[in-house]
Amino acid sequence: VKAPPFAYARASSLDDALELLHEAGDDAKLLAGGQSLLPLLAYRVVRPSHLVDIDALDELTGIRPAAGDVSLGALTRHAELERAGLEGAARLLALAASHVGHLPIRNRGTLGGSLAHADPAAELPVAALALDAGVVLRSRGGERRIPVAEFFVGPFTTAIAPGEMITEVVLPADVREGRAAFKELAVRSGDFALAAAGVTARVNDGRAARVRIALGGVDATPVRAMRAEAVLEGRELSRDAIAEAAHVAASACDPVDDAVTSAAYRRRLVERLVRDALTCLGDEAAG
Amino acid sequence: MSESRWVEASADLPVRVVLNGEPVTLSAGVRWTLADAVRAHGLTGTHLGCEHGVCGACTVLLDGEPVRACLVLAPQADGRRVDTVEALGEPDALHPVQQAFRDARALQCGFCTPGFVVLAAWLREREPEADEVRLREVLSSNLCRCTGYQPILQAMRSRP
């Protein structure tokens, strides 16, 4: 097993990476942790002309939970998300990260890499969507920030333009409040999920507010179950309310049959996962 | 920017690492993985099973943390510390984890064993109090097609 031929360069800084990326043209790829890209190269599913290695760029590391938004460097490893002590709704990233692959993979895989790869069944995109994250994209020409809801375009397809790279993922300041739960089912632990549900909410006096329900593995991109969110807004997280929301989430999603399982099974799974995740939120709120 | 920044696919490049405590310069093809590079250096204890990150047979420590050596491009290890199974013990002086694997018959064909032993020795050192759930969670990273895993867990429970 050998990767197809590519020319390689290691970037010495963010600006250098952008320069190399520009110079290499449209068929270049960035290499960060490599936990998705190297298997794709091994299978020769992708054949980039150039690889720009950004794995060692300190500028892109670190979680900066100062006042205001929470900024996560694109090279934040899954293992760091698990250990970072993220609180409130933001803890969803830690919970989601703990489901990604296995420990050695989480030591290398990066947040930016997972978003850029945009696997429809991946965990971190689901969490980013539930948290209303913004994705900061930089190119030689400048910087733009787009909501994660506009970032995922299709399976393995994003709004990243040629010459652009993710530099950070920004969470709104209010993710420090509230609660989070993440549930998924995979055939074996560490596999990609058949379906996954990430939920966050604030619970005040027993009533839910700012409910977010994001689903993975059921569509071309991660999706929000907005109708199900609306069901819960302002209500108690009672058994009945949760069951209703889970049912609405399942009815509204549109999975397809694939080699692993059927659309019908996935829809039932969504109902169960959303119910379990919301129950988890409710239990936490109860004490 | 000059063209010279790019290393062409057919070229070799030096990868400076501290390999099992010794500073060495590996010569690696651009497309080589870290596993290829340590094996070409003569350390063939690191086994390549699937070569796409599924089996864990190639597990090594990179800067002290377990990684799949088949999912690290060799040049990415430049300037870093790499520890392979060869750092753990010698045939006549086994590492306690290797001895525990032997005692528990935690191997049969032995192909996956280096990866398991590297991961298990790391876990023992880093988390000596790891409970059964944690043992299973961490070891679920690697595949063994002979033992059915129970002897491996048994070796780990013996807390060597």
Image: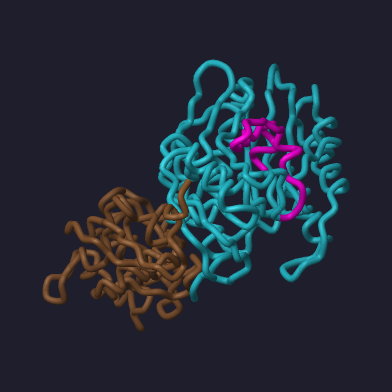
Residue A198, located in which quarter of the rendered image? top right
The number of callouts visible is 0
Residue lying furthest front? B2
The one of A266 and A50 positioned closer to us in this rendering: A50
Picture residue at 72% right of the left edge, 54% below the top: A217
The magenta stretch spans residue A74: no
Residue A238 located left or right of residue B70 = right
Residue B137 seen in the figure: no
Residue A81 seen in the figure: yes
The one of A240 and A154 positioned closer to us in this rendering: A154
Residue A25, image x, y percentages: 61, 53
Picture residue at 40% right of the left edge, 77% below the top: B147
The C terminus of chain A is located in which quarter? top right
Determine whether A221 is above or below B31 in the image: above
Q: Color of chain B here?
A: brown
**Colour scheme employed for the rendering of this structure:** by chain
Residue B132, located in which quarter of the rendered image? bottom left
The magenta stretch spans residue A132: yes
Residue A14, image x, y percentages: 48, 38
Q: Which one of the lettered chains is coloured cyan?
A: A
Residue A248, image x, y percentages: 86, 42
Residue B11, image x, y percentages: 40, 68
Determine whether A238 is above or below A158 in the image: above
Q: Which residues are magenta?
A: A126-155
Picture residue at 65% right of the left edge, 38% below the top: A128
